């Protein structure tokens, strides 16, 4: 898999995409550099002056859209009840939340909001694992933060 990143420009309010993290010596311009390692090897967060956190590319969603840390995704779910032989769907809908990387657990949806087909919104305080092949990118934390409300 290709290593790709994006970073949010706080001034122009847009993403800059690149294959290798970049930074200039005077920290005013972006230019190619070798891969920047965070001080904490388990962390994926690297701050660039004038910019936000580096957001790494991880996978693509069901439509082929790239999923980065900081993406907001919808992921469908179904809950079942079983009597041993038959399963009955008791609830279905989708989770919506910000994509984060937990070094020990992989890609997760941070504090997702569960949207039921009955119109309920239930905020979770835990993280939910991601299945990229059934998920859909609907925005990101910089351009569409209102999706997380």
Image (cartoon, grey):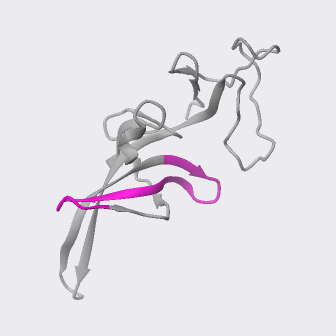
Please name the predominant secondary structure of the magenta segment in the image. Answer: strand
x and y percentages locating residue 16 in the rendered image = 56, 20
Q: Residue at x 20, y 58 (%)?
A: 119
Let me know if residue 111 is in the magenta part: yes
Residue 105: give x, y in percent of width and height. Answer: 58, 59
Work out whether 149 lies above or below 5.
below
Q: Residue furthest bottom?
A: 83
- Is residue 48 shown left or right of residue 112? right
Looking at the rendering, which quadrant does residue 86 occupy? Answer: bottom left
What is the number of callouts on the image? 0
Magenta span contains residue 19: no
| Residue closer to the observer: 44 or 88 | 44
**Quadrant (top left, top right, bottom left, bottom right) of the N terminus:** top right
Look at the picture and state if 25 lies above or below 76: above
| Quadrant housing residue 78 | bottom left
Residue at horizontal 42 percent and vertical 56 percent from the top: 112
Q: What residue is rendered at 47% in x and 37% in y?
A: 141
Q: Left of 104 or right of it: where is 113?
A: left
How far across and how far down the image is residue 144, in percent? 40, 34
Which residue occupies the foreground of this view, 62 or 22? 22
Side (left or right) of 95 relative to 42: left
Specify start and end residues of the magenta stretch as a single range.
Answer: 99-121
Expressed as whole percent of the image width and height from the top left, the position of residue 146 reads 38, 40
At horizontal 67% and vertical 42% (from top left) the residue drawn is 44
């Amino acid at each position: 898999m290709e290593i790709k990143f994006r970073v949010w420009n706080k001034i122009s309010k847009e993403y800059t995409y690149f294959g290798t993290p970049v930074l200039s010596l005077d920290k005013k311009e972006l230019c190619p550099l070798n891969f920047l390692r965070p001080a904490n090897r388990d962390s994926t967060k690297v701050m660039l002056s004038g910019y936000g956190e580096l957001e790494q590319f991880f996978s693509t969603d069901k439509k082929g859209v790239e999923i980065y840390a900081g993406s907001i995704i919808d992921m469908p779910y179904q809950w079942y009840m079983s009597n041993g032989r038959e399963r009955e769907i008791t609830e279905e809908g989708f989770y919506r939340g910000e994509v984060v990387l937990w070094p020990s657990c992989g890609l997760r949806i941070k504090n997702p909001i569960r949207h039921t087909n009955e119109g309920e919104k239930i905020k979770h305080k835990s993280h939910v694992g991601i299945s990229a092949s059934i998920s859909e990118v609907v925005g990101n934390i910089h351009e569409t933060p209102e999706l997380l409300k």
